[in-house]
Image (cartoon, helix red, strand yellow):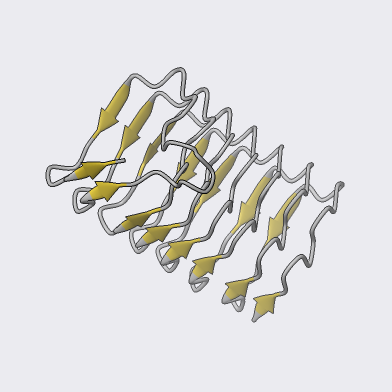
Amino acid sequence: TSIDSHAFSSCSKLTSVTIPESVKSIGSGAFSSCSALTSINIPEGVTNIEVYTFENCSSLTSITIPNSVTSIGHGAFQYCSSLTSAIIGNSVTSFGELVFQNCKSLISIVLPNTVQTIGGGLFSGCEALTSVVLPENLDSLLTERRYHLGFFENCNSLSSITLPKYLITIG
């Protein structure tokens, strides 16, 4: 029913993972630094993507977050340099800090309207990012002072941001 923290961390020859439907939790750093990992199937029923779960999976090209997931932890996809697309399920309410930091190939992303909290530096260093749609109900974007990174810092290709109607504060 669960995959422990760091269970497959640094398995450099692991290319693909199919997680059975019985798994409900994936521990922090479970697949971090799996440099050959190109695809992973996260089943419905998993409720959280923990901190650093897929950090530095440099060959991962796309990810689909199922509707059962409600939160995505700090640095979950940080340094996934080949990640071009991320489909986020409609139940995610919070993103930790630096979730997509330095995902240099990420092109566009739509955050579902269920998102209420976004951590600082979410897209910092996403050099290929051209388009972002932020959730309608989000009322503030505050930068993370600990890391001194803005949400879109070094997003050199960014040409379109759709801001929410009720946004009050941009840090």
Q: Is residue 65 above or below residue 57?
A: below
Q: Nearer the viewer, residue 100 or 105?
A: 100
Residue that appears at 35% across and 62% down:
93
> Measured from the top left, where is residue 15 in percent x and y?
78, 47
Q: Nearer the viewer, residue 14 or 6?
A: 6
Q: Quadrant of residue 94?
A: bottom left
Q: Nearer the viewer, residue 76 or 109?
A: 76
Residue that appears at 35% across and 64% down:
91
Q: Is residue 108 above or below residue 92?
A: above
Q: Is residue 164 left or right of residue 64?
A: left
> Measured from the top left, where is residue 134 in percent x and y?
28, 42
Viewport quadrant of the C terminus: top left
Residue that appears at 82% across and 51% down:
14
> Measured from the top left, where is residue 44 in percent x and y?
49, 68
> Measured from the top left, where is residue 115 in percent x and y?
31, 57
Q: Is residue 113 above or below residue 163?
A: below
Q: Quadrant of residue 62?
A: top right
Q: Is residue 152 left or right of residue 138?
A: right
Viewport quadrant of the N terminus: bottom right
Residue that appears at 39% across and 22% down:
158
Q: Is residue 34 left or right of residue 144?
A: right
